[in-house]
């Protein structure tokens, strides 16, 4: 991944064109509704304005290359964890929060060098083993501070925070080291967002039966199945971006996004409901917090990563 | 088994700017880190560019809450006063800053809240509420309040009349009040100038006193403001002998 590779990559060009095209079409449609027909589309408009910033930033970072992409996604993970820490109250303990920050920065650093065992970018072995050291480090903190009271909660929240937002989300970042980095990264990002939009649209149109009534009352089986259908179809349309994928891989890629996307959303909703909050933060106007935006990615990225690695290796 | 007790941050669903505008602000590592870095840069810059000289540092109380009071003729004033405090006290020092000037636009809010750690003082519509805020702040041991009792920057650089507001929460309390006099800040960066000029600045810190013997009220407030004004004036006269 370098700027010149991006310029010559048909995959990057394709996704950039599709994303900017969708933005243009959606922007035109919303503008007509909002300014022409004076319809109340405030919510959709705000969400669109959020995308208007996020899409160019994302494309820009990926265009710039491997290192900027790794730095960017690592930072996103850290700010996502910060929202989680603030929402749970873990943030008031700066030692624990700081330890997780350090562990997450270290995760990012592991993706930058060349693998010491083979001549490929990213130290995969260390990345996989890192939770062992991170958890050992987190457990060390109450011991060093000689504290007992309330420590289990802090330890548990820190470990969940690191594993989920640091390490599992880190798999998305690590895809920047893959041979087909553009195809994998952009597929996961695009497919997950499309899956979200499809679930929302199918739910709005045909939603009858609640999917998980206690967790997310607005989600429906109709929405979930509609999104699954769309996500199952998408890899076949994008087959040219990963020509080495056989039908088995295309089906798995669709299933991972179609099912994992919903589950990632629900997983964060479980946390939010238990905490009694609506959004994880207010970092992205019209979208809530960073976690509200990347919730599905956290779940999907590691599953997709290991599917690809098992069948094709990353490089 | 007992339920876990979660404490979501109070400002969870506010945007960054809203979080910086509220007071008291929730602690934030990034904000604290930026403030420390900014303070280090500012101290270096004041030292090199303005040859800042601090006299009477020993008068600053080592612990407990206290109030720093100074004349006000420049944006440099607050930076000089903060530079006289140890780094460890940086996040506990709250300069009262005009809400209508510092907490409206985004860049100024950022500078006031992050770099200076300012307390938004509502001098126009609800000064009473802001005065109560100052009182609460001092009640939390170890907090430092920085106040310019003139209420605004002097256009001429001359010492103006001290407003009695701070007397309202100082009378009958045992918080030490430290008078300070800033010399040269007006020449270095007067009101209306875009950039500071490389003129020397000198900060003189006088001995502190408390106003525990007074009973709170309007008369005491006026007495306190007059007394502090006289103290700052005498620091000025001592620093710059006049004919």
Image: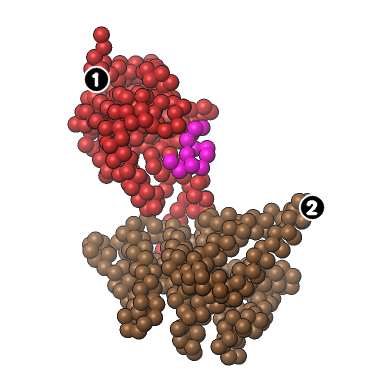
Query: Where A162 falls versus A92 (above or below)?
Result: below
The residue furthest left is B58
Structural distance between the alpha carbons of marks 1 and 2: 69 Å
Query: In this view of the protein, can residue A286 be seen by the observer?
Result: yes
**Bounds of the magenta span?**
B100-111
**SS category of the residue bearing label 2:** helix
In-front residue for pair B220/A81: A81
Residue occupying the point 41% across, 58% down: A89
The residue under label 2 is A36
Residue A49 lies in quadrant: bottom right
Which chain letter goes with mark 2?
A
- The image shows residue A297, relative to residue B48, as above or below, that is below
Q: Position of residue B144 (x, y in %)?
A: 32, 36
Which dot marks residue B239?
A: 1
Q: Residue at x 58, y 86 (%)?
A: A243
- The colour chain B appears in is red
State whether the magenta stretch is mostly helix, strand or loop: helix
Expressed as whole percent of the image width and height from the top left, the position of residue B2 reads: 40, 65
**B53 relative to B34 in the view: left or right:** left
Secondary structure at numbered mark 1: helix
Q: Residue at x 49, y 53 (%)?
A: B12
Tell me if residue B122 is in the magenta stretch.
Answer: no
Q: Nearer the viewer, residue B229 or A273?
A: B229
Label for residue B79? none
Measured as percent of width and height from the top left, residue B141 is found at 30, 39
Residue drawn at point x = 34 percent, y = 35 percent? B79
Q: For residue A271, say whether it is visible.
A: no
Query: In the rendered view, does B160 fall on the left or right side of A303?
Result: left
Q: Quadrant of residue A250?
A: bottom right
Neighbour class for label 1 at 10 Å: few (<14), some, many (≥20)? some
User: Number of marks in the image?
Assistant: 2
Q: Colour of chain A?
A: brown
């Amino acid at each position: 991944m370098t700027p010149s590779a991006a310029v010559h990559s048909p995959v990057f060009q394709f996704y950039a064109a599709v994303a900017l095209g969708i933005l243009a079409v959606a922007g035109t449609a919303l503008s007509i509704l909002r300014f022409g027909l004076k319809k109340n589309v405030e919510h959709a408009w705000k969400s669109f304005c959020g995308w208007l910033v996020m899409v160019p930033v994302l494309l820009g970072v990926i265009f710039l290359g491997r290192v900027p992409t790794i730095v960017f996604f690592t930072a996103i993970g850290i700010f996502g964890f910060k929202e989680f820490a603030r929402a749970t109250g873990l943030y008031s303990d700066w030692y624990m929060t700081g330890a997780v920050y350090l562990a997450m920065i270290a995760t990012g650093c592991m993706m930058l060098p060349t693998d010491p065992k083979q001549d490929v970018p990213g130290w995969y072995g260390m990345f996989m083993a890192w939770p062992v050291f991170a958890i050992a480090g987190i457990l060390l903190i109450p011991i060093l501070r000689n504290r007992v009271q309330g420590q289990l909660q802090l330890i548990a929240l820190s470990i969940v925070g690191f594993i989920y937002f640091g390490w599992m989300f880190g798999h998305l970042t690590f895809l920047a080291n893959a041979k087909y980095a553009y195809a994998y990264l952009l597929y996961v990002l695009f497919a997950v967002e499309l899956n979200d939009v499809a679930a929302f649209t199918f739910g709005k149109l045909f939603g009858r039966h609640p999917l998980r009534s206690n967790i997310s009352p607005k989600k429906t089986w109709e929405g979930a199945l509609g999104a699954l259908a769309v996500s199952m179809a998408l890899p076949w349309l994008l087959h040219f971006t990963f020509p080495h994928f056989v039908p088995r891989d295309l089906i798995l890629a669709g299933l991972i996004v179609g099912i994992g996307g919903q589950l990632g959303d629900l997983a964060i909703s479980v946390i939010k409901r238990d905490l009694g909050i609506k959004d994880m933060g207010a970092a992205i106007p019209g979208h809530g917090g960073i976690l509200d935006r990347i919730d599905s990615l956290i779940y999907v990225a590691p599953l997709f990563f290991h599917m690809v690695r098992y069948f094709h290796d990353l490089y | 088994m007992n339920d876990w007790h979660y404490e979501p941050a109070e400002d969870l669903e506010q945007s960054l700017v809203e979080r910086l505008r509220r007071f008291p602000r929730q602690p934030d590592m990034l904000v604290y880190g930026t403030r420390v870095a900014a303070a280090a840069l500012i101290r270096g810059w004041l030292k090199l560019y303005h040859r800042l000289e601090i006299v009477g540092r020993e008068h600053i109380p080592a612990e407990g809450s206290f109030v720093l009071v100074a004349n006000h003729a420049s944006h440099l004033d607050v930076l000089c006063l903060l530079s006289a405090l140890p780094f460890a006290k940086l996040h506990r020092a709250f300069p009262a800053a005009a809400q209508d000037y510092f907490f409206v636009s985004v860049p100024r809010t950022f500078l006031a809240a992050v770099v200076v750690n300012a307390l938004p003082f509502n001098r126009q519509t609800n000064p009473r509420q802001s005065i109560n805020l100052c009182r609460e702040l001092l009640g939390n041991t170890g907090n430092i309040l920085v106040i310019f009792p003139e209420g605004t920057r002097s256009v001429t650089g001359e010492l103006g009349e001290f407003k009695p507001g701070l007397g309202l929460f100082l009378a009958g309390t045992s918080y030490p009040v430290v008078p300070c006099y800033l010399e040269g800040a007006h020449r270095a960066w007067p009101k209306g100038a875009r950039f500071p000029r490389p003129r020397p600045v000198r900060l003189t810190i006088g001995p502190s006193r408390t106003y525990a013997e007074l009973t709170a009220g309007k008369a005491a407030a006026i007495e306190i403001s007059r007394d502090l004004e006289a103290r700052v004036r005498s620091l000025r006269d001592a620093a710059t002998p006049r004919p």
